[in-house]
Image (spheres, rainbow, N blue to C red):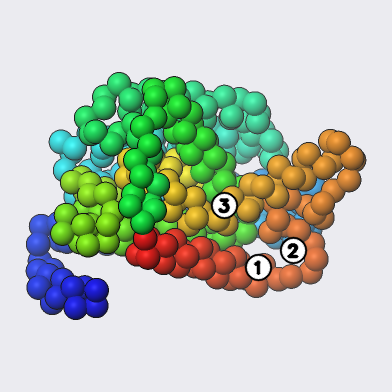
Amino acid sequence: MLIIITNFFLNLNWITHLNLRFFGSLFTSFFILLIFGPFLINYLKKKKVHQIIRKEGPNLHKKKKNVPTMGGILIIFSITISVLLWSNLQNIQVWYVLITLLMYSIIGFIDDYKKIKNQNSTGLRSCWKYFFQSISALLIGFFLCVNNENYLSIKLILPLLNPIIIKLNFVTYIILIYFILVGTSNGVNLTDGLDGLAIMPVILISFGSTIMLFIIGNINIANYFNVIYLKYANELNIIYASIIGSGLGFLWFNTYPSQIIMGDTGSLGLGGILGILAILTHQEFFFFIMSGVFIIETISVILQMISFKLYKKRIFYMAPIHHHYELKGYSEPKIVIRIWIISIIFLLISLIIFIGF
């Protein structure tokens, strides 16, 4: 295996069209954030588009009340521009991704706008947010099934010693898409509560996915690792590159103490794009592992709600779980770095299973 991988990198022409577009997409989105970030921060400050702090939140968060929010606008903009510049726009998969990104970003934008306008942390009511997320997911799932161009499009791949392809009917596949899109968008949204907390797992998931797609997108390497070859996988890697670039650019301003917060515009949009990419590349299994941090944060909220409604008791001091550790006295940077470490571990586990199987 070592010989094959070594020969692959030695014989690789790094100036190929695909690799040029990959790095072009990454650096384009990165520099868009780096160049326009300060302008957006100053503009939002002038317009007093500041983070709305939950009254029941940790007292330490009161110092964030003057931090500009809705930075996700620039994240979404940079990803979109990079994809339009460097992707093959004749590939319908690219448009599925962009449409999903736009739909979930609009939901997040409405939520952020209502928070700023009403000067409270409620924003878009939960039932309406969930309704719009659900409608978006169902519409995307419907069109994916109707415009089924690839024979794998309505099948689930289980990465065992010999990959098992499970054929799904129309309804089952839409339900799967629904849970992935709604679950991921909410997971990223719930995790985005501390400086830099959510964006790093997004970067790591995108990085891990690019490694997998470079293998899946090469028929010889895919056969060696005994994984299903997807001819359009490398094209979707251009989109992952734009996410990595925009994520790194945003992290430049979002590290503690943050100069800007992505808001629901960014978190819902990023959750949506990660979910649709996992679906289109049939990496749902590995995506589930890599998204471990988002899943833990979401489960902590669900458990807290169930416990309080049934027994009038709280399992955590506050949910999501990162607030629990804040109230226990842990510093924000320590919580963030440790969650980053956990996210790296989930990434390594998924890569080990991917290569091992």
Check whether the beta carbons of the residues at disc 3 and disc 1 lie within 8 A of each other: no
Q: Is residue 357 above or below residue 120?
A: below
Q: Residues within 10 Å of mark 1 (few under 14, many from 20)?
A: some
Q: Amino acid at mark 3?
A: Phe
Q: Quadrant of residue 316?
A: bottom right
Taking depth in this image into account, of 152 and 315 the one nearest to the observer is 152
Q: Which mark is residue 325?
A: 2
SS type, badge 1: helix
Amino acid on which disc 1 is placed: Ile
Q: Position of residue 155 (x, y in %)?
A: 35, 35
Name the residue furthest right. Answer: 312
Give the residue at the far front of this rendering: 162
Asked whether the beta carbons under mark 2 and mark 1 sit within 8 Å of each other, the answer is: yes
Marks 3, 2: nearer the viewer: 3
Q: Is residue 191 left or right of residue 101?
A: right
| Amino acid type of the residue tagged 2 in the rendering | Tyr
Q: Is residue 231 above or below residue 338?
A: above
Q: CA distance from mark 3 to mark 2?
A: 16 Å
Q: Residue 89's x, y, as percent?
A: 18, 38
Give residue 92's position: percent from left, percent from top: 22, 34
